[in-house]
Amino acid sequence: MRQPITGYHRDDEGHWVAQLACGHNQHVRHEPPFINLPWVVTPEGRDSMLGIGLACKKCDEGALPDEQPRED
C-alpha cells in the first residue's frame, strides 16, 4: 500500500527515515549501485518528496504504527 511521506528523522546511526501518513517509518537510503535514491542526500531533495507515496510493507502486513520521534 502506498503512503505519502509526511516528514523525516534520522535513526541512531544517522540514516534517514521517512515518516509516512499511516504512522509507519521507512528507511530511505542512497547506496549506489544497489539503491539509487539521490534525493535523500540533500534537504531540497527530501523536501521535494514530501507527499509522494512510498510502498509501505508494514501496512500490507497490518502492523501497528511505529513510535515517532518527539519534536523538541
Image (cartoon, rainbow, N blue to C red):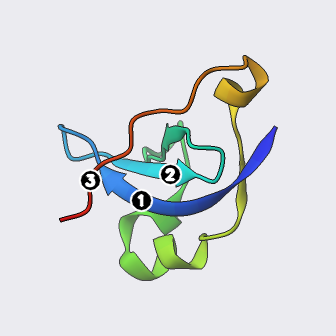
Q: Residues within 10 Å of mark 1 (few under 14, many from 20)?
A: many
Q: Which residue is mark 3?
A: 70
Q: Amino acid at mark 2?
A: Gln
Q: Amino acid at mark 3?
A: Arg
Residue at point 54% right, 42% down? 35
**Number of numbered discs:** 3
Horizontal arrangement in the rendering, residue 49 relative to residue 4 (left or right): left
Q: Nearer the viewer, residue 15 or 71?
A: 71
Determine whether 7 is above or below 45 in the image: above
In the figure, residue 57 lies in which quadrant? top right
Q: Which residue is mark 1?
A: 8
Residue at point 48% right, 63% down? 7
Q: Which mark is residue 19?
A: 2
**Which callout, 3 or 1, points at the residue further toward the start of the chain?**
1
Tag 2–tag 1 contact (CB < 8 Å): yes
**Which callout, 2 or 3, points at the residue further toward the start of the chain?**
2
Residue 33 lies, in percent from the top left, at: 51, 42
In whole angstroms, how far apart are the C-alphas of marks 3 and 1? 12 Å
Q: Residues within 10 Å of mark 2 (few under 14, many from 20)?
A: many
In whole angstroms, how far apart are the C-alphas of marks 2 and 1? 5 Å
Residue at point 41% right, 59% down? 8
In whole angstroms, how far apart are the C-alphas of marks 2 and 3? 12 Å
